[in-house]
Amino acid sequence: MSTTFIHDNFLLENKFAEELYHNYSKNQPIIDYHNHLSPQLIAEDTIFDNITKVWINGDHYKWRAMRTLGINEQFITGNASDKDKFLNWAKTVPYTMRNPLYHWTHLELARYFDITELLNEKSAEKIYEEASSKINSQEYSTRNLLRKVNAEFVCTTEDPIDTLEHHQKLAKNPFETKVSTAFRPDKAILISNDGYNDYINILGEKAGLTIDTYSDLCSALRNRIDYFDKKGCKLCDHGLDQVYFENFTENEINTIFKKKRENGTLSNEEALKFQSAILLFLFETYHEFGWVQQLHLGALRNNNARMHRILGPDTGWDSISDYPQAQKLSAFLNALDSKDKLAKTIIYNLNPADNEVMATMIGNFNDGSVKGKVQFGSGWWFLDQKDGMTKQLNALSNMGLISCFIGMLTDSRSFLSFPRHEYFRRILCNLLGDEIKRGELPNDMEWIGKMVSDISYNNAKEYFNI
């Protein structure tokens, strides 16, 4: 066995785990059905100037770690040189042991650059030069980075006001990886957010109508759903603290929206009623278009008001929240199901205390019409690490059918994040291999291997009709 840290059997603790991974999972293509990659960079087949541009810029996971170590913001999001930012990240890496960043860092260096040396202050200069010389070449363009990991399908995430011009360019000039988009209309839902009316004005312009009433808003959103659908979109995504489900009347919603458009101040109850109404409208419309809908629940965002003012959202100031989830989510899904308007649904949970809640909730609405119709999504954000993924897999196994699971995704803005699929696959195979070793599962490699292949690739391919 190799003495390097990242070796062939990394995380695989016995021969059964090794066989499952190498024979049934390792070589499966990647279906990355939710990420935040830039479609423009893919369409233009961008070549990055250096490793920092593609690896550190925009990565708030790394930024949080660097801040914790006491590194000045100048070397994180500030005006320091790209090389100095990399050197400060390299200084941080040894301190990230037992954080998934340590594993991800060395997997990414190994898989993309064939660099197996540990990254630290001593190796930083050499690794920066070696990785940068490679990344700054056609072989490492965005499309070739996707080819390197055998990415068959990637789905980016766009706002309803997006023109999808870059997706249209990709459709006219396709390559081995199919690139699609997911519709994310949260800015039209969260009526209490600053700038809401300005956003609605832009949405109206994109839809070709003036939005004065709630009916106008619904028409505009339906217009954009139709536009996205015609451009090949078959998924939506919502990043919400929790699902909203309050009783409301049509008159109430009309009044609330009119009040907001006239710059009135809404009560929390009014906001929740409105958010409930628009969410139901959207999900019924998704069903009509045959889309898959995704709910990312449980984040507490923008906790540090001072740094949010300075740097804006998605810069590393979010955390897990403890919102109650079960009752409203149940009522919402039931309202859709009672009308037979519940589409395929993936529910991602950020609070590990709610794993069993979500794992049992999906069973309430798996009605036999579609294999795995309602899914408990993979561990995401703070939970896409070894312990978090294992707990999600165990909860799903104990409360449902892991054999129907559609597997991993990156949820990332980085073109170097795809080894997270390998990380997940190794954890899955080791979990099953350990149970074979202990006699808790039979030594039936043909069947368990098929299950591993399905979770790694086949289930997602079937679920998304790829």
Image (tube, rainbow, N blue to C red):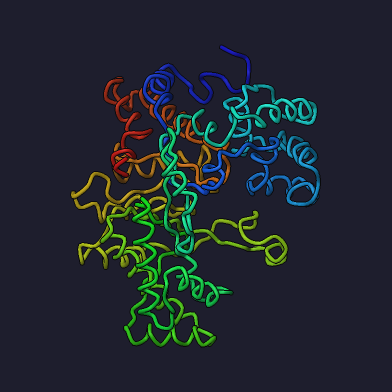
* Residue at left offset 38%, top offset 22%: 20
Looking at the image, is 163 positioned above or below residue 432? below
Residue 459: quadrant of the picture = top left
User: Disc count in the image?
Assistant: 0
Q: Position of residue 124 (x, y in %)?
A: 76, 30
For the C terminus, the quadrant is top left
Q: Quadrant of residue 274?
A: bottom left
Residue 271 placement (x, y as % from top left): 46, 78
Q: Is residue 357 visible?
A: no
Instruction: Tell me if residue 258 comes above or below residue 222 in the rendering.
Output: below
Quadrant where the image shows the N terminus:
top right
Res. 352 visible in picture: yes
Q: Is residue 233 left or right of residue 38?
A: left
**For this view, does 281 lie left or right of residue 177?**
left
Residue positioned most to the left: 368
Question: Against 5, is 226 above or below?
Answer: below
- Furthest residue toward front: 172
Residue found 40% across the figure and 18% down from its top: 19
Name the spot of residue 394 as percent of width and height, x first: 39, 40
Q: Nearest the camera: 302 or 350?
A: 302
Quick one: 351 or 145, which is closer to the camera? 145
Residue lying furthest top: 1
- Quadrant for residue 272, please give it: bottom left
From the viewer's side, name the closer residue of 191 and 267: 191
Q: Residue at x 42, y 72 (%)?
A: 208
Q: Position of residue 430 (x, y in %)?
A: 44, 27
> Which residue is pictured at 63% across the width and 28% down the height?
109
